[in-house]
Image: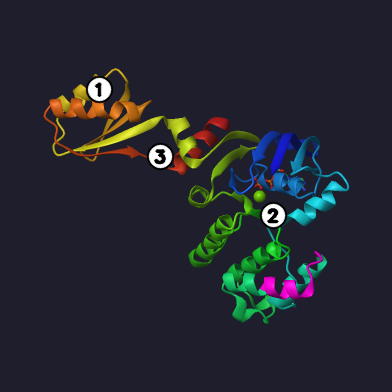
């Protein structure tokens, strides 16, 4: 659905995005994470044909970004929630959406139906006739999201959709995104909220001007930490600890909360041998499970290494 080849954009000689080669597949939620100034917004603006690349190419489907008539097609195919969406303050929520729908050539009846559907899902239908100027930040954001969807785009770009929202509004927006995903939509999500990325995204790209890593949250955690088996025993003794350390496939062993955290390459193969070693040395096993490293740890490690 999205493909970029060595995509690069500079502003007055400063590189904002450097040789980005990336693929995003139909039906997935792809998250772009990275610190402020990493080039996330710049990438999205290129993909939505709002600015051109300095070098390299980007495609949405078969259409090349920044090339006519392809850009016209792309604008119809994509919806964008920009970083700071401008709405018509004096118009009502409904009129704002109606105006956009018209702009995109959505027919009258269909438009009315679509606006009602979106505003209902976003829990804002009751306020449809009120002017935007009276709306809170969270409500404005919902209107801006509805606006990005009014023409039923096949691909939705969300640039920091929950930034600055209160927890409840953020949750409504996240649930809404998950529902779009269930309906089969393709979503490109810029965020520096790792909690959000971990919960919403099938795959994540870590960007810091250059692309540092791509993978599912679990893959990233595994790739940068290896895998870890957690064993809880009734009473942990030095003898058990030593026996586990002595296993040749074990990379490292840590004690945590009276249990063991064991780093190793192939837990599916090796966990039975760990269990045997523990039991043969007097350990009574309460549980064996995979310990998952959070995305936050992965992210901080990657960004730390890249700067
Ligand atoms: N229109 C612009 N003019 C000059 N510099 C820009 C412009 N847009 C972005 N930049 C610069 O490009 C870099 C990447 O910015 P941006 O894409 O907004 O990052 P992010 O969205 O990851 O925070 C930053 O250094 C920013 O200052
Ligand atoms: Mg940005």
Q: Earlier in the sequence, mark 2 or mark 3?
A: 2
Q: Earlier in the sequence, mark 1 or mark 2?
A: 2
Q: Residue at x 78, y 74 (%)?
A: 108
Q: Secondary structure at mark 2?
A: loop
Q: Which mark is residue 113?
A: none
Vertical comparison of 227 with 286: above or below: above
Q: Which residue is mark 3?
A: 293
Vertical comparison of 181 with 129: above or below: above
Q: Residue at x 62, y 67 (%)?
A: 142
Q: Nearer the viewer, mark 1 or mark 2?
A: 2
Pointers 3 and 1 in contact (C-beta within 8 Å): no
Estimate the spatial distance between the alpha carbons at disc 2 and disc 3, rounded to whole Å. 33 Å
Left or right relative to 9: residue 31: left
Magenta-drawn segment: 104-115
Question: Quadrant location of the C terminus?
Answer: top right
Left or right relative to 297: residue 259: left
Vertical comparison of 136 with 223: above or below: below
Q: Which residue is mark 1?
A: 245
Estimate the spatial distance between the alpha carbons at disc 1 and disc 2, rounded to whole Å. 52 Å
């Amino acid at each position: 659905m999205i493909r970029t080849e060595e995509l690069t954009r500079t502003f007055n000689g400063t590189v904002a995005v450097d040789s980005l080669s990336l693929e995003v597949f139909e039906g997935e939620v792809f998250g772009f994470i990275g610190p402020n100034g990493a080039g996330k917004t710049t990438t999205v603006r290129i993909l939505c044909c709002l600015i051109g690349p300095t070098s390299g190419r980007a495609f949405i489907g078969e259409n090349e970004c920044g090339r006519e008539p392809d850009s016209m097609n792309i604008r119809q195919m994509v919806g964008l929630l920009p970083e700071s969406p401008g709405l018509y303050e004096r118009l009502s929520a409904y009129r704002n959406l109606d105006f956009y729908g018209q702009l995109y050539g959505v027919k009258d009846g269909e438009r009315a139906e679509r606006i009602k559907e979106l505003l209902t899902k976003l829990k804002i239908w009751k306020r449809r006739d009120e002017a935007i100027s009276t709306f809170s930040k969270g409500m404005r954001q919902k209107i801006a999201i509805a606006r990005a969807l009014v023409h039923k785009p096949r691909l939705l770009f969300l640039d920091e959709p929950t930034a600055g929202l209160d927890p409840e509004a953020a949750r409504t927006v996240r649930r809404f995104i998950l529902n779009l995903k269930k309906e089969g939509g393709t979503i490109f999500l810029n965020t520096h909220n790792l909690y959000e990325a971990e919960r919403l995204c099938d795959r994540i790209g870590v960007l810091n001007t250059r692309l540092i890593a791509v993978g599912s949250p679990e893959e990233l955690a595994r790739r940068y930490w290896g895998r870890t088996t957690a064993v809880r025993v009734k009473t942990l003794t030095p003898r058990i600890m030593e026996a586990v350390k002595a296993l040749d496939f074990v990379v490292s062993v840590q004690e945590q909360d009276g249990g063991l955290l064991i780093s190793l390459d192939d837990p599916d193969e090796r966990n039975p041998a760990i269990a045997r070693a523990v039991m043969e040395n007097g350990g009574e096993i309460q549980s064996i499970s995979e310990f998952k490293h959070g995305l936050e740890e992965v992210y901080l490690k990657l960004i730390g290494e890249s700067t």
